[in-house]
Amino acid sequence: MKTEILEPVTTSAPLSGVTTACRESAAAPRRAIQLKNILVPLDFSELSLKSLQYAIPFARHFGAKITLLHVVQAPAYSVDFSYYPPLRPEQIATIEEQLERIRNQKIPAELPVHIIVRENLVFEGILELAREICADLIIATTHGRTGLTHLVMGSTAENIVRRAPCPVLVVRETEHDFV
């Protein structure tokens, strides 16, 4: 009987939506969980701030950077195809100041934090940035809408979980906390 050693199969096709830097880090052997980039989308509600209760201990434990993201919902086109101009620089600056206040009030100074503002459909903006920064974890909150409200509005958290390029921790308002 002849024993044959098979070579690993490789493809030259790029992975969709994954940057070279993400692929290189994914190719490294993993011995334990490693978190370098934690993405925390915030809508400035008290509920969204609850995600920081999880992001901060994770960032401390793993030495990870926290990216605070606020996505301004791009307006839906109207029947008359009205044009909505993009955010003005002063609007972006105001949102960045709000995120910076949250950073200063809620996150210890020794943790690295990056602040980003985007304009897009909320879940698409979150997923797009997660791919760009090679997020290792997204920590998001959900309002837990059900029934007709869920049907009409959809669920941002559900869309993130279904399409995310990394694990997602979804924090609920009335759920048991483990931190």
Image (tube, rainbow, N blue to C red):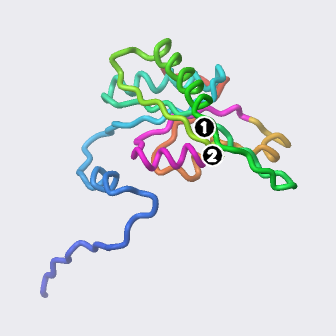
Q: Residue furthest left?
A: 2
Residue at 31 percent of width and 38 percent of height: 34
Residue 105 is labelled as: none
Circle 2 sits on which residue?
A: 120
Query: Which image quarter: residue 35?
Result: top left
- In terms of depth relative to the viewer, which is nearer, 109 or 94? 94
- Badge 2 crowding class, 10 Å Cα cut-off, few under 14, some 14 to 19, many 20 or more, is some
Which residue corresponds to the image point at 32% horizontal and 73% vertical from the top-left? 12
Extent of the magenta region: 123-144
- Give x and y (percent) for residue 137: 44, 39
**Position of residue 103 measured from the top left corner of the image (x, y, whole percent):** 47, 19
State the CA–CA distance, disc 2 to disc 1. 6 Å
Q: Considering the numbered disc 1 on the image, is that residue within a helix, a strand or a loop?
A: strand
Q: Position of residue 142 (x, y in %)?
A: 65, 33
Q: Amino acid at mark 1?
A: Val
Marked residue nearer the N-terminal end (2 or 1): 1
**Would residue 120 be found to the left or right of residue 11 on screen?**
right
Q: How many marks?
A: 2
Residue that badge 1 annotates: 71
Q: Quadrant of the N terminus?
A: bottom left
Secondary structure beneath dot 2 equals: strand
Q: Is residue 118 above or below residue 51?
A: below
Query: Is residue 175 in the magenta section?
Result: no
What residue lies at 63% left-to-right and 41% top-to-bottom?
157
Residue 163 in the image: x percent, y percent? 56, 53
Q: Amino acid at mark 2?
A: Asn
Pointers 2 and 1 in contact (C-beta within 8 Å): yes
110 lies left or right of 16: left
Which is more toward the observer, 118 or 143? 118
As drawn, is 134 to the left or to the right of 68?
A: left
Is 37 placed above or below 175 here? below
